[in-house]
Amino acid sequence: MKHRSLRARLWISALISITVALLIAWLGLANLFERHVERHLAAELETQLNQLAAAVEIAPDGSLRLIQQLRGLAFAQPLSGRYWQIDRAGQAGVLRSRSLWDEVLTLPEDELTPGEVHAHRLPGPDGQSLLVRERRIRVEGDPAPVELRLILAQDRAELIRARANFAADMRPYLGLIALLLTLATLIQIQTGLAPLEALRREIGAIRDGRAARLAAKAPDEVRPLIAELNALLEAREGSVERARAWTADLAHGLKTPLSVLAADAERLRQAGHPALAEDLDQLALTIRRRVERELIRARVRSGHPSHAARTDVVENLERLLRTLGRTPAGERIDWWVQAPDRVEVALMAGDLLELLGNLLENAAKWADERVDIQVSTSADGQVEIQIADDGPGVAPAHWSRLGERGLRLDERQAGTGLGLAIVRDVVEAYGGTLGFGRAELGGLLVWVRLPGG
């Protein structure tokens, strides 16, 4: 099957099986009923054969006669479908029922011992298909016994009608059985797939940081999969820990060279080379910032963000604004904040501070004198943070490129081009959304949607 859904495969297989089984049952029961009715008719015909044998005799003039007519109006009604006939050696239809009218039943020649009953299916009057029973008897006559062939026939149309009526009567019951089987299949599929649904929820809990491993409580068929997934999680955690250790070693290894650069800059400054010392300080600062931000990017990308964390946006925003207000770039900005008293997001505090810090630093760097910050909560529980500045802004053609690693649209401004790239990494790690637009103040509008806490 090409269906990707396991549920669809099970449904299709079950419906095909139910349909085929009910069709076979319907045809089988109809055939069994037909055979039952046919046996009943055959027994009735054989009984009437015995009655006919008891009623026939040889008249004194040598002719055949019945001392008693067979009961049943069908034998008196022309072409009724129920017939009897008596053949004598060389003469067919010497005596026959009124229902045969002018017709004579012609049977194949076969050898019968007296008392033996043979069955035939023959064409009859008016295009009928007849179920026939025949028997040979000997009747005492003068001067010698006479051998007679007794024939009873029944139109199979009655049998076919009975079969059709029985099949029609079965339809509603088979429909009810189909409905019950479908409901049973639904319950069976739901029950059978329940462990997979539970597994999906547990994997979601691991992704959200609410669990570290998959529970072992599962059917035997699912346990090997759980064991493999847990082994994969352990291997991934080992890789993450090794990556974190490597980045920590890298940061520690760069501390000494950066300290040497700072010491060299100080010696140059004391030796009367302030410009060269400033360049060296700026170089060391750039390297330190780039390393720090790359470490943050590595942590966010390789780590396992916990969506179970709850961090207040407003509290951390106010803390960052107080810090920025003491910097040369931030003290000249008029910060306007519109936010509720408390709004929580499902981010770890360090990641939220990194996200907000980069956004506010970027706004302070480009703003002329004002930055507007708005925090709100949507109906679906998402928290939206909007930061708008009154700077030169960014052309709409470049909005889709903002957040690319190392992108700097204005080379005259200092920086590494990593700020918005780190913001994008943090937002994507937590399943949020990052967007850009034109602010009413004239500059760039940056908005972030994050899962609420």
Image (tube, rainbow, N blue to C red):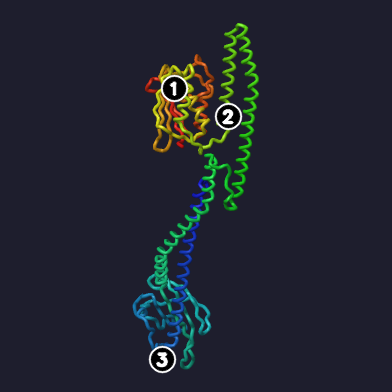
Residue 451 visible from this viewpoint: yes
Select label 3 or label 1 by which is in front. Answer: 1
| Residue 47: percent from left, percent from top | 45, 82
Tell me the SS state at disc 1: helix
Residue 356 vs residue 180, the one in the foreground: 356
| Residue 92: percent from left, percent from top | 43, 80
Tell me the SS state at disc 2: helix
Pointer 3: what residue?
Answer: 59
Q: Earlier in the sequence, mark 2 or mark 3?
A: 3
Residue 6 vs residue 43, the one in the foreground: 6
The residue depicted at 52 percent of the width and 33 percent of the height is 348
Q: Earlier in the sequence, mark 3 or mark 1?
A: 3
| Callout 2 crowding tier (Cα within 10 Å): few <14, some 14–19, many ≥20 | some
Cα separation, mark 2 vs mark 3, equals 120 Å
Pointer 2: what residue?
Answer: 298
The amino acid type, in three-letter code, at marker 2 is Ala
The amino acid type, in three-letter code, at marker 3 is Ala
Residue 392 visible from this viewpoint: no
| Callout 3 crowding tier (Cα within 10 Å): few <14, some 14–19, many ≥20 | few
Can you say whether 422 is above or below 275 in the image?
Answer: below
Pointer 1: what residue?
Answer: 397
Q: Earlier in the sequence, mark 2 or mark 1?
A: 2
Cα separation, mark 3 vs mark 1, equals 121 Å
The amino acid type, in three-letter code, at marker 1 is Ala
State yes or no: discs 3 and 1 in contact (Cβ < 8 Å): no
| Residue 8: percent from left, percent from top | 49, 49
Cα separation, mark 2 vs mark 1, equals 29 Å
The residue depicted at 47 percent of the width and 68 percent of the height is 31
| Callout 1 crowding tier (Cα within 10 Å): few <14, some 14–19, many ≥20 | few
